[in-house]
Image: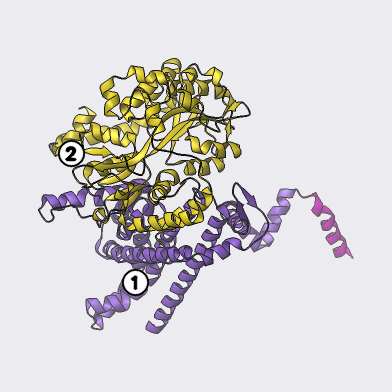
Chain colours: A purple, B yellow
Amino acid sequence: MAERAEVSAARLEAPRLGLVDRIRAAAMRHEPIRGYALLSPTMVWMLVALAVPLAILVTLSFWTQNYLDFDRTFSFNNYIVYFEKPIYLKLLIKSVKISGAVTLATVLLAYPAAYFIAFKVKKNKLMWLILITVPFWTSYLLRVFAWKVVLGFNGVINSGLITLGVIDAPLEFILYNPTAVVITLAHAWAAFAILPIYVSLEKIDRSLLEAAADLGEGPIMSFLRVTLPLSMPGIIASSLLVFIPTTGDYVTPNLVGGPTGIMIGNIVASLFGKANNWPLGAATAVMSMFFITLVVCAFLWFTKQVRERVA
Amino acid sequence: MEANELMDKMTSGKMTRREFKKALAAVGLGLFAAPLASRRGLAATEDHPVIFTWEGYEDPGMHGSYLSKHGESPNFTFFGDEEEAFAKMRAGFTPDIVMPCSYKVAIWRDAGIIQPIDDSRLSNFGDTIESLKNVPDMVVDGKRYWVCMDWGQTSIIYREDMVDIEEESWGLMWDERYRGRLSMMDSLIDGVMVAAIYGGAKDPFNMTPEEVDRTKELLREQLPLLRYYSSSPTDIQNALASGEVVAAVGWNDAYSALKAEGIPVKFMEPKEGAMTWTCGISLMAEGDASKLDKAYDIIDALISPEAGAWEITEFGYGHANRKAFDLVDDATLADRGLTRNPEDRLNSGIFQEPIGNEPELQNMFEEVKTGA
């Protein structure tokens, strides 16, 4: 009887605790609450800056443009137009090809740089990493313009080659085409590829390489069988980091792409701008996201297959 | 070291390493100090109206009387063409003054973007050339929505030394011999309409479906011949000067600037007719009411004879103020292809009008540009 009386006394006392104390007590008891509380600033931000705009975009894509206003009745019109007119899918495929080339070029160029810093640099690694990010201290737009100057008709490459007597007239095929877009983007996104690859190379246990050498593997084979497979996470991460944003890029094709270097981002920009058809623009953007997701999933599946077969 | 001298030295490669480093240090110091110095300047210009306009009109030569009255220039921000401007304003951008050409005013008024102007508050309005005062559709129910500022032409600027043609025609923009050396304007009125005129559309601004198809076909044919679609006069100016492009569709200003640099260019009189346009000034409906007096001061400055004389001399455009022509000598006028009787020029050529089925044409053009 005495015990029960104590318990009921404790129950009676409980409401007297302040609100803060009660929240604290709840947080102590439930692990998930603590987790969500810790995450909440990020979650609120993600909700406001990502989920809400995305929801608006998807909603918008089911409306129709009525010259100056939106017709808010639900319809699949924009998606029908998207698949009926060949330009959207054609342009999307072209964009995927261009940014595929960009990804390949960026990763191929980034790997040696990352390898050098991870394995060959012994002192001042931090300085080397900072040096790699130096080009990013200037604006993205400025770097694209710089490429325009480098590749231009009277640009650095052309005037250099003319001075050296290699060519008589400026080369015109190096600017205002898809190649120029690939060159510019491959430079602009270099650091995004170097850093993840560097991290995965840095993590490799050096004793594995020694073991490979002890077991009689040459430098090439030990790279192919030890270093490369172990740095795959870095390669995959940097491929995705470069591929996903560049597919939708529109500034670079706009400035250096000329009439043949247009990408899907340009048509989305013009639908939201000059063509003044936001719903169709929204549908195009949604479909781009969908197809890029598909491509990325296929890429991840493929790399998984390869790794399983190798391992 | 003067800025020009610096540029000359750099381009001719006569700069020593020491001088170059000195210049770089100066730039670095300047960049570092700029945020400290400009703070006051920025705060002051917030009191001035924002003008949304074409590149080039920001020169103090165009608003001298405003500058002397208020001590500072107003704020300028630019668009490449009016479709871009319209999209930006529809999306919530509210400048105080916007400078459309006549063919856009009706649509912008319908969209509620612009408000009536009280022309009695403009001391220079009375001197406007009569026909420009009475451009159709600018006054609705006795309210004026647009004040004319200038007029000019859209035609082909070409390098006389690099292009060999027997007669002047828009066809030069489809000439296979100059593949990759041509540039078209990225615009409905100055780009798509060129193809419409060349294709022989009866009324290019109100085309029949067959004429639209023909125009589309022509634009498709043209795409592989182009170096790029230009979106600012400086684009084609540089490209024509270097010879990267031998012929480009453009306005009088690029022609005048190239001519002044001594480059052998010609402004074409195509046999199909050049396009004539007239542009002006409107007040934004949702502009800042507290800046309205200053807004009127700017409009009055822009249509003053002094601004007009400056514009005629520098850009080679005709101005709307009749008195502006009196401030310019005969040789300068003749050199710009203008006369003392502006109506001569105004009545020749194809006058740009509002485009019927505009959204459809814009979609068509965007589709063509993708090359798909």
| Quarter of the figure with residue B289 | top right
Point out the residue furthest to the right here: A1
Q: Main secondary structure of the magenta part?
A: helix
Q: Chain of mark 1?
A: A
* Dot 1 amino acid type: Asp
Q: Chain of mark 2?
A: B
Amino acid carrying mark 2 in the image: Thr
Is the residue at mark 2 from the same chain as the one at mark 1? no
Query: What residue did someone put label 1 on?
Result: A205
Segment colored magenta = A1-17
Task: Say if residue B135 shows up in the picture.
Answer: yes
**Residue B11 - label:** 2
Q: Position of residue B236 (x, y in %)?
A: 30, 43
Please determine whether, in this image, residue B342 is positioned above or below residue A303: above
Rendering quarter of residue A185: bottom left
Q: Where residue B330 sits: x, y (%)?
A: 28, 21
Front one among A210 and B35? B35
Q: Secondary structure at mark 2?
A: helix
